[in-house]
Image (tube, grey):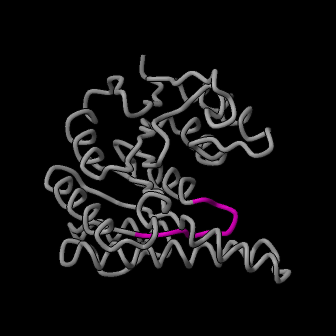
């Protein structure tokens, strides 16, 4: 099974804890024994801090995007270091390079590519391009809710939804100031367009990421730690 994994910087690179990188590396190493993995790392707090500083200096948004991309690639470089010989040694800078790197049989790790696209969007586009079996968005939220649970205590978590339902939820959440959906609008549109089987998963515990993807990925069944997005009935 080919799995494209969007690994949020907020969970991977929190406090730049080396032990945390090593724990995720071990989980990915174990997953790679059964699956082909392509991992896209997010920027996390470091990216937000750098972008905030750039904006305060008057930098335009494209420049800010490029700064964020560089941070995602630094996180990718750290994860490659943690994976050692199990990782493809270079960071692909395009979708085509990522496709070629998969032929190495190693775990491929990369960051952002294009200004204006989050790493979730990059992951969704890669999943489409590579005809991946599963797109996984590993984040600090335990699934997709009817509203932002941080702002709406009555929000309901979904175990399984359609891509069309995801779009309606994401657009409603993104329209509200201060709210944040677990899947950004561009990624959601790609998931809808391609009917990608997608799992949004609370992966703050690396061992849980390994367990769920190994035991549940082929089942497409509801899990307490996440939400399945699928066009399948």
Tell me: residue 39, above or below residue 151: below
Tell me: residue 154, above or below residue 48: above
Tell me: residue 229, above or below residue 26: above
Residue at the image point whose x is 41% and y is 33% from the top: 226
User: Is residue 115 found inside the magenta-colored segment of the image?
Assistant: yes
Closest to the observer: 103 or 16?
Answer: 16
The range drawn in magenta is 110-118
Residue at the image point whose x is 15% and y is 49% from the top: 34
Quarter of the image for residue 20 reads: bottom left
Closest to the observer: 202 or 117?
Answer: 202
Picture quarter with the C terminus:
top left
Closest to the observer: 86 or 174?
Answer: 174
Residue at the image point whose x is 66% and y is 44% from the top: 180
The picture places residue 196, in percent across and down from the top left corner, at: 46, 38
Closest to the observer: 5 or 190?
Answer: 5
The picture places residue 197, in percent across and down from the top left corner, at: 42, 35
Extreme-top residue of the structure: 233
The picture places residue 7, in percent across and down from the top left corner, at: 43, 57
Q: Is residue 135 left or right of residue 32?
A: right
User: Is residue 173 found inside the magenta-colored segment of the image?
Assistant: no
Q: Is residue 212 left or right of residue 43?
A: left
**Secondary structure, magenta segment, majority class:** loop
């Amino acid at each position: 099974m080919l799995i494209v994994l969007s690994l949020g910087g907020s969970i991977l690179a929190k406090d730049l804890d080396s032990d945390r990188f090593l724990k995720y590396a071990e989980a990915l190493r174990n997953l790679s024994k059964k699956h082909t993995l392509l991992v896209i790392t997010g920027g996390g707090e470091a990216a937000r801090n750098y972008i905030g500083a750039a904006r305060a200096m008057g930098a335009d948004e494209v420049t800010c995007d490029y700064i964020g991309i560089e941070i995602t690639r630094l996180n990718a470089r750290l994860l490659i270091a943690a994976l050692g010989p199990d990782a493809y040694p270079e960071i692909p800078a395009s979708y085509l390079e990522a496709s070629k790197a998969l032929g190495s049989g190693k775990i491929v790790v990369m960051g952002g590519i294009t200004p204006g696209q989050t790493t979730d969007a990059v992951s969704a586009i890669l999943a489409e391009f590579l005809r991946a079996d599963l797109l996984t968005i590993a984040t600090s939220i335990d699934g997709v809710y009817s509203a932002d649970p941080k702002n709406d205590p009555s929000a309901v978590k979904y175990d399984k939804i359609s891509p069309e339902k995801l779009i309606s939820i994401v657009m409603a959440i993104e329209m509200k100031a201060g709210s944040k959906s677990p899947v950004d609008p561009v990624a959601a549109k790609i998931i809808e367009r391609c009917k990608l089987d997608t799992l949004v998963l609370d992966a703050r515990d690396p061992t849980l990421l390994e367990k769920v993807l190994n035991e549940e990925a082929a089942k497409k069944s509801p899990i307490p730690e996440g939400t399945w997005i699928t066009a399948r009935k």
